[in-house]
Image: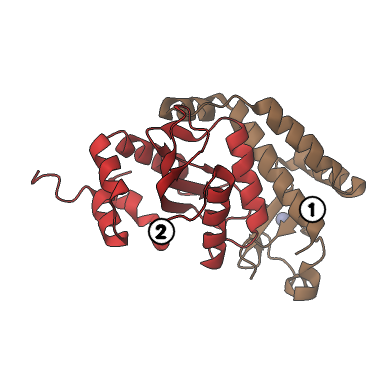
Chain colours: A red, B brown
């Protein structure tokens, strides 16, 4: 999956530059509520329960202030990708114990013909290993800028 | 939305997660990304608890269909059962009927509308 294909999974409706939540469950709830309000998901409790169960399997906070809550649910009609940021950071139980500020959520249906779920998740994990990209995302002002960061626009000129 | 149906959807999500966690190919992909998959016992406990809140006859039917067909609850899109691709009867789509637990006439799976339409 290239960066253009990856970016097309993120919609402007699912973009929160400043989360209000102050803890892990609060972040998951705020993001799921937002997706429900945007009409992307209907049965929010099912999705929220799935995401919490996934965290009990091992934190999706991979360190350096980034978490990737993810999983499959029958309650999502098609693959959903969602970016959110907490300016202050929240206690997430991340593997390095640091507060998390950047959240990439991926929710996939149980069967997905295009099979983009794990490739997309892997691609974002890879992009985020770069400290410069993380720094840009911490400063992101809007969706258009988010687009440029994910696409890697301007990298050649640097 | 029918509460028992919601519980069945949640149960199937958990069963999917447990199955994927135990799937070596899937677990290796996630491990390579850096994700630990350690708490599968917690998932099994959560599953038992959830199963306990589902009506016995319904749970029994869920387990039976799962064993036979792999997936007991299936989504409907464009009035088609995604378990067997049979078209479902128009009467099933009334709001009244959506409050009931309905089974595909062709494959017997439990039907669910993920889009609400
Ligand atoms: Zn069917």
Q: Nearer the viewer, residue A30 or A22?
A: A22
Asked if both marks, 1 and 2, belong to the same chain, the answer given is no
Does dot 2 land on a helix, a strand or a loop?
A: strand
In 3D space, how far apart are the residues under numbered discs 1 and 2 (Cα atoms)?
A: 40 Å
Evaluate whether residue A51 shows in this view. Answer: yes
Query: Residue shown at 34%/49% (left/top)?
Result: A6
Query: Residue shown at 73%/58% (left/top)?
Result: B111
Give neighbour class at mark 1: few <14, some 14-19, many 20+ (Cα, 10 Å): some
Q: Is residue A132 left or right of residue A117?
A: left
Ligand 1 is within 8 Å of the C-beta of the residue at disc 1: yes
Ligand 1 shown in quarter: bottom right
Q: Nearer the viewer, residue A131 or A99?
A: A99
Residue A144 in the image: state x and y as whole percent.
27, 61
Between marks 1 and 2 in the image, the one whose residue lies nearer the viewer:
2
Q: Which residue is mark 2?
A: A15
| Label drawn at residue B108 | 1
Quarter of the picture containing the C terminus of chain B is: bottom right
Q: Nearer the viewer, residue A146 or B66?
A: A146
Ligand 1 is within 8 Å of the C-beta of the residue at disc 2: no
Residue B92 in the image: state x and y as whole percent.
76, 70
Evaluate whether residue A109 shows in this view. Answer: no
């Amino acid at each position: 999956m290239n960066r253009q294909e990856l970016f097309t999974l993120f919609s402007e409706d699912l973009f929160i530059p400043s989360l209000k939540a102050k803890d892990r469950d609060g972040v998951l709830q705020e993001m799921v509520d937002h997706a429900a309000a945007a009409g992307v998901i209907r049965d929010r409790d099912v999705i929220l329960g799935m995401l919490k169960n996934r965290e009990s399997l091992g934190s999706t906070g991979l360190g350096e202030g980034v978490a990737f809550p993810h999983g499959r649910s029958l309650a999502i009609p098609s693959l959903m990708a969602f970016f959110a940021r907490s300016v202050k950071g929240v206690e997430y139980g991340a593997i390095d114990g640091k507060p998390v500020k950047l959240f990439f959520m991926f929710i996939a249906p149980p069967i997905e013909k295009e099979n983009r779920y794990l490739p997309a998740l892997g691609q974002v994990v890879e992009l985020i290993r770069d400290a410069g990209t993380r720094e840009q995302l911490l400063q992101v002002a809007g969706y258009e800028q988010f687009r440029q960061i994910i696409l890697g626009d301007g990298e050649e000129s640097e | 939305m029918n509460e028992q149906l919601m519980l069945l959807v949640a149960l199937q999500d958990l069963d999917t997660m447990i199955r994927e966690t135990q799937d070596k190919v899937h677990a290796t992909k996630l491990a390579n990304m850096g994700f630990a998959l350690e708490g599968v016992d917690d998932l099994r406990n959560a599953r038992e608890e959830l199963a306990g809140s589902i009506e016995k006859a319904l749970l029994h039917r869920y387990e039976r269909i799962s064993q036979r067909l792999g997936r007991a609850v299936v989504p409907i899109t464009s009035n088609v059962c995604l378990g067997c691709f049979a078209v479902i009867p128009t009467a099933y789509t009334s709001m009244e009927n959506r409050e009931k637990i309905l089974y595909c006439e062709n494959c017997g799976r439990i039907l669910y509308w993920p889009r609400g339409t």
